[in-house]
Image: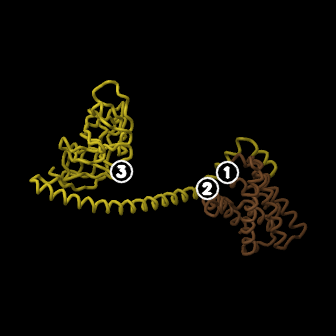
Chain colours: A brown, B yellow
Amino acid sequence: MKLVLAVASLFLMAFYNTLLSNMISIYGVTIDLAVVLVTIAAFYSGEAGATWFAILIAIVASSQRIELMPWEIGSLAAIAVIINIVSFRMNLDSLVSRMVLMGLALLIHGVMVITIISFDDFYFVLLRFVLPGVIYSLVLGWILIVTGKTFAGLGRVRM
Amino acid sequence: MAVLLLVAVSGNDVRPFLGNISTSIFYAPFYKLKEKIENLQSSAEENRALKKQLVEMNLQLGALQEARRENWRLRESMGLKPPADFHIVPVRLVAVIEQFYPIGAVINKGSDDGIRVNQAIVNRYGLVGKIKETLAHSAAVQLLTDPGNAVAIRVAETHQMGTVRYSPEKGMILNNLPADAQVKKGDLIVTSGLGGIYPAGLTVARVDSVLPNTGEIFKSVRLKSAANFSELDELFVLTGGGQ
């Protein structure tokens, strides 16, 4: 079941990058689906499983911009490991704490991307696109965690 | 393991490989879907534009039919023969004859369908050529791009007359236009009706450039044909008109 969900998530990532991203963007603000999926996997899977999932998601997410691939693999794998360790060792089960972790992950990933792409107007991009994108992504993350009984049903069975 | 992969991906050879695998497995179905959606969107836009054009054309047609009736009444009152009445026969392109560029074509209707030699053939943009030979169920078309196909024309704005001929070196050229003729870029060129092959008023081309006068008695004018001869699709043969 977890493997099916993981493969479906990879297809969802490709679908999002190809079609969905432009359709659901609001004034250029888009969802960072890769971080949302990796964070949710990190909440509900084991460390190794979440890390491999993060690597695969990073490869699929950056296959249209291969120059970002090492950065995406590194950052998403790090996010998966750190969130997994923090949420399991500190026993963070509440929705608020998970949203805070996801928000931090989204912010760090967004800042990393604009730093690598090296936009001239860093603060403008941060305020205009990254921060609203974090909020927009958090809404999706909240919906997936609250209503996604499938994710929750996976429990804490480690991959 | 993940660190090893990260190190490997840092190399320039691994990234395209992984990118290609990911694209062919995960992206390929959605690229096809995206292409279909885009085709559907462009078809819908084209459909809307064509519907609008149809309404405009219907309005123009109504006005023109009224003008034609008036023209007939005036001709009758002056004792002149009424103008020829044409019908259009939609035909399908079967083959294109090329000599480095298209100079002829074969269509799927022939003499059994009322197609006759020298009838004009048009598409939605304008004149394409004329029927050169007919068989029972097919016909050969001599396109305007055939250097042997000259068309008697006039400049729509000024009514000055000349002939249009295609030259492999220069493209579509307007000949026999007096050096002092008033013609400028963008002017519409239509058939004059002289010569008895093409009916008057069919769009042929627009003026692309007027070459500087070098003291000759005729002006050299380069034209841009209305029809794109590399993309011929729906064609119509003008039948009737006393032919």
Work out whether residue B4 or residue A70 is closer to the camera in this orientation and state it.
A70
Q: Which numbered tag is attached to residue A63?
A: 1
Judged left or right of residue B172, residue A4 is right
> Which callout, 3 or 2, points at the residue further toward the start of the chain?
2
- The residue carrying pointer 1 sits among few (fewer than 14), some (14 to 19) or many (20 or more) residues within 10 Å by Cα, namely many
Judged left or right of residue A102, residue B185 is left
Residue B200 seen: yes
- The residue carrying pointer 3 sits among few (fewer than 14), some (14 to 19) or many (20 or more) residues within 10 Å by Cα, namely some
Work out whether residue A156 or residue A104 is closer to the camera in this orientation and state it.
A104
Q: Secondary structure at mark 2?
A: helix
Q: Secondary structure at mark 1?
A: loop
Residue A149 seen: no
State if disc 1 and disc 3 touch (CB < 8 Å): no
Judged left or right of residue B177, residue A17 is right
Residue type pointed to by label 2 = Tyr
Q: Which numbered tag is attached to residue B233?
A: 3
Chain assignment, label 2? B
- The residue carrying pointer 2 sits among few (fewer than 14), some (14 to 19) or many (20 or more) residues within 10 Å by Cα, namely many
> Can you tell which quarter of the image residue A140 is in?
bottom right
Asked if labels 3 and 1 share a chain, the reply is no
Give the CA distance from mark 3 to mark 1: 39 Å
Please give the residue where the numbered disc 2 appears in the rendered image: B27
Work out whether residue A118 or residue A92 is closer to the camera in this orientation and state it.
A118
Residue type pointed to by label 3 = Asp
Asked if labels 2 and 1 share a chain, the reply is no
Chain assignment, label 3? B
Give the CA distance from mark 3 to mark 2: 33 Å
Q: Secondary structure at mark 3?
A: loop
Instruction: Name the residue rendered at 19%, 60% in the picture.
Output: B69
> Can you tell which quarter of the image residue B50 is in?
bottom left
* Residue A9: image location, x then y, percent: 69, 63
